[in-house]
Image (tube, rainbow, N blue to C red):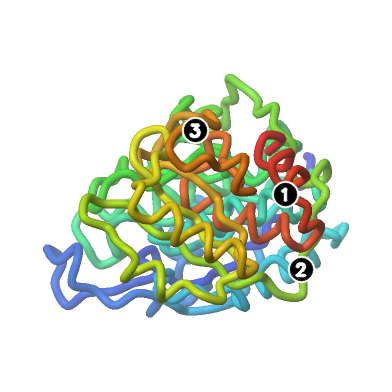
Amino acid sequence: MASLPRITVVATGGTIAGSAASTTDATGYRAGTTGVADLIAAVPELAELATLDGEQFASIDSSDLTNELLIGLARRVSELADDDAVDGIVITHGTDTLEETAYFLHLVLATSKPVVLVGSMRPPTALSADGPRNIFAAVTVAASAGSRGHGVLVVMNDQIHSARDVTKTASLSVDAFESPFGPLGVVTSGRALFYRRLVRPHTIDTEFGIPASLPSSAVLFAHSGLDSTLTESLAGYDVIVHAGFGNGTVSSRVVSELEELRANGSLIVRASRTGSGNLTRIGASDEIANGWVAVDDQNPQRARLLASLALTVTRDKAEIQRIFYRY
């Protein structure tokens, strides 16, 4: 009989490891109270899928994620991926920033081994907790030979998503994670089934490595009435992503303010607050003349990370624009 795949579960906390005083309480819980050994033990069926090791990297609410923790996680996962005794990696993570961690790893991990992020919308103590099912699905994907080479994946609600596209679209629903072009595949009856493949570069095909640190960055969310009061507080940031209206529209009231920030050294990135769709390089901002950069279809939170990584390899605006169109 063939030996089972060897999967390492790296726990970081989050709802999937949380607890509440009542089984009917799915929101008033404390995140990150359950250790990785208990998460694994709660799903004994995992032993049928893989030989599992677990390690506790962090025990946080993912809203408290920092750049330093993100880089540290990337380094640890990279070490595991380089270990011949590890066939795949599952990372349990809070859902608030799960998509950001997944995208960062998708760009900096030089491995074709499956790396799967998973979370839950309800704590283990809740009625109909979704965590055990999600962990089972995530290990199913990580243990599947067909998962190699797809980049970093996110498995939630029996769907397999690419880290490039997936985003959290609902505050409480168990089907909160969606991709604008649909999932790559599904988990059915203990099998990982893929139906499409990502064509944008990732993992072993990117120009990025794991940086020692990341530039400072911020996202400015456009709204009616926005004026220079908020932009003044952004002075000194290396990256400023403007999450604009529609096609990334920037209000005429703040164009000159953003241009002043750019002149003082900030990289200005024009994105959209709508959540999906690619941007064209037209509009009131006159961004080409101003030396700004536009996203392709990256949402503001992904644009922040991609711009930060871009600055670790170049400061040329044309090259950074190429990076946004490539990834």
Q: Amino acid at mark 1?
A: Lys
Mark in front: 2 vs 1: 1
Q: Amino acid at mark 3?
A: Val
Question: Could you tell me which secondary element the residue under label 2 belongs to?
Answer: loop
Residue sitting nearer the eye, 198 or 283: 283
Distance from the alpha carbon under mark 3 to that under mark 1:
41 Å
Q: Which residue is mark 3?
A: 187
> Could you tell which of marks 3 and 1 lies nearer the N-terminus?
3
Residue 204 relative to residue 231: left or right: right
Q: Which residue is mark 2?
A: 211
Which residue is found at the position 78% from the left and 39% from the top? 1
Check the image and report above or below for 232 versus 202. below
Which residue is found at the position 65% from the left and 68% from the top? 265
Q: Can residue 140 be seen?
A: no
Mark in front: 3 vs 2: 2
Q: Which residue is mark 1?
A: 317
Distance from the alpha carbon under mark 2 to that under mark 1:
20 Å
Q: Amino acid at mark 2?
A: Pro
